[in-house]
Image (cartoon, rainbow, N blue to C red):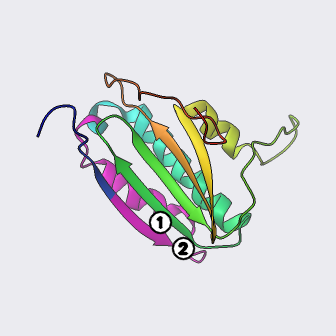
């Protein structure tokens, strides 16, 4: 295989509302441990796990649906994707200093290299990209609306 060809690995799991985000974090950590860069990038692993928590929580709390979590490593970026049943696009909220919630997507935006969402016939998928230290940045950066 030539170096220019994509090499990818991925995992998928559904997390019912009854399981909560904790099960998703444990599942994701088990798969992250198999990636060579994860041992040397604990801060990035923490950022990925926080994103998994936020995405699953949003699917359960706001979409009132199960969360289908997909992790994909494409040799450049770890993509964290969650599909839920709501067609409503995600939007970072501008919360006051006294708010006790509503900052999840703002946190994801700060921690990830990019994030986007895609409407689908049966809901939407929200994806964040994480580039490990020492890896080249993706050829294009994505904005939250999926444009470059």
Q: Are marks 2 and 1 in contact (CB under 8 Å)?
A: yes
Question: 18 above or below 41?
Answer: below
Q: Name the residue located 63 percent from the left edge and 69 percent from the top edge.
A: 121
* Nearest to the observer: residue 123 or residue 54: 123
Question: 35 above or below 17?
Answer: above
* Horizontal arrangement in the rendering, residue 124 relative to residue 14 (left or right): right
Q: Which residues are magenta?
A: 11-37
* Horizontal arrangement in the rendering, residue 99 relative to residue 12 (left or right): right
* Magenta-span inclusion, residue 28: yes
Q: CA distance from mark 2 to mark 1?
A: 6 Å
Residue 83 screen position, x and y as percent: 56, 63
Q: Name the residue located 13 percent from the left edge and 35 percent from the top edge.
A: 2
* Horizontal arrangement in the rendering, residue 90 relative to residue 84 (left or right): right
* Nearest to the observer: residue 105 or residue 127: 127
Q: Name the residue located 48 percent from the left edge and 39 percent from the top edge.
A: 129
Query: Which residue in the protein does label 2 denote?
Result: 19
Q: Secondary structure at mark 1?
A: helix
Q: Name the residue located 46 percent from the left edge and 57 percent from the top edge.
A: 25
Q: Secondary structure at mark 2?
A: loop
* Magenta-span inclusion, residue 69: no
Q: Sort mark 1 into few (<14), some (14-19) or many (20+) by Cα contacts within 10 Å.
A: some
Residue 63 screen position, x and y as percent: 71, 67
Query: Which residue in the protein does label 1 denote?
Result: 23
Q: Choose top left, top right, bottom left or bottom right for residue 139.
A: top left
Residue 55 screen position, x and y as percent: 59, 55
Q: Sort mark 2 into few (<14), some (14-19) or many (20+) by Cα contacts within 10 Å.
A: few
Indicate which disc residue 128 carries: none
């Amino acid at each position: 295989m030539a170096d220019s060809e994509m090499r990818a690995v991925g995992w998928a799991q559904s997390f019912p509302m009854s399981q909560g985000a904790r099960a998703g974090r444990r599942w994701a950590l088990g798969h992250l441990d198999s990636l060579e860069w994860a041992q040397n990038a604990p801060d990035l692993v923490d950022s990925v796990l926080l994103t998994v928590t936020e995405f699953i929580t949003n699917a359960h709390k706001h979409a009132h649906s199960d969360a289908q979590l997909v992790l994909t490593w494409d040799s450049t970026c770890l993509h964290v994707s969650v599909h839920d049943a709501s067609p409503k696009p995600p939007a970072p909220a501008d919360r006051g200093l006294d708010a006790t919630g509503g900052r999840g997507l703002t946190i994801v935006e700060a921690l990830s290299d990019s994030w986007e969402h895609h409407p689908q016939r049966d809901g939407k998928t929200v994806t964040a990209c994480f580039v490990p230290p020492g890896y080249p940045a993706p050829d294009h950066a994505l904005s939250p609306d999926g444009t470059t």
